Amino acid sequence: MTLLIVDDDMWLCSALSRNLVRLGYAARRAASVDAALTLMATEPVSAVLTDLDLGAGGDGVELITRMRAAGSRVPALMMTGSDRAVARARLADAGLDEIAIIEKPFEFDQVMKKLAEVVPAVAASSPAIAPAPRSVPVAAVIDTVTRTFGRRVL
């Protein structure tokens, strides 16, 4: 399984990628809508995990809308540090009511549980759903980076 992580926060992408690779999955990263669509045109992905707000690179609603318009039925999950109701309303306005939302900060195990709900290969692979040894919450990785660089990431 290859998961495409779309977020303008390279630290979050890196933390998620490392955890996925440790469990035997492949991870690809993109920082914008255009970069994600370009990657998807050249490489098959099993699921897309996108942030709602991608800074100057667009937003996750635009990404999923453009994926669907192009005929892609790849499962998608939405991450957001914004208000969940606002995120849900933006998805509903775009006709994307079926998209699951993961609120930041989150633990990696939450991502795997949501993936198991939408991707059959993850659900069939029980080790991926079980907590990994010495699993570090993604938020803790980000907090460490935040303190080091003195900027707010989430």
Image: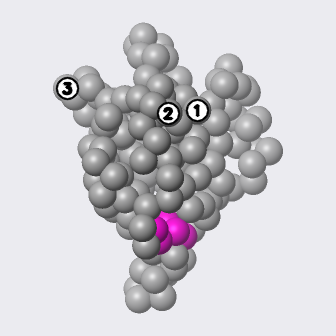
Q: Viewer-proximal residue, 106 or 84?
A: 106
Q: Which mark is residue 123?
A: 2
Secondary element under disc 2, as helix, strand or loop, is: helix
Residue 63 in sight in this render: no
Residue 144 vertical placement versus 19 (above, below):
below
**Which of the two discs, 2 and 3, labels the residue nearer the N terminus?**
3
Q: Residues within 10 Å of mark 3 (few under 14, many from 20)?
A: few
Which range is magenta?
A: 135-139
Whether label 1 touches label 2, CB < 8 Å: yes
Q: Quadrant of the C terminus?
A: bottom right
Q: Which mark is residue 42?
A: 3
Instruction: Report the Cα–Cα distance between label 2 and label 3.
Output: 26 Å
Quarter of image, res 107: bottom right
Picture coordinates of residue 26, whole percent (x, y): 27, 44
Amino acid tagged 2: Ala
Q: Mark 1 or 2, which is nearer the eye?
A: 2
Picture coordinates of residue 52, whole percent (x, y): 57, 45
Q: Residues within 10 Å of mark 1 (few under 14, many from 20)?
A: few
Using residue 113 as the reference point, say whether residue 73 is left or right of it.
left
Q: Viewer-proximal residue, 42 or 55?
A: 42
Quarter of image, res 47: top left
Quarter of image, res 15: bottom left
**Which of the two discs, 1 and 2, labels the residue nearer the N terminus?**
1
Picture coordinates of residue 29, whole percent (x, y): 31, 48
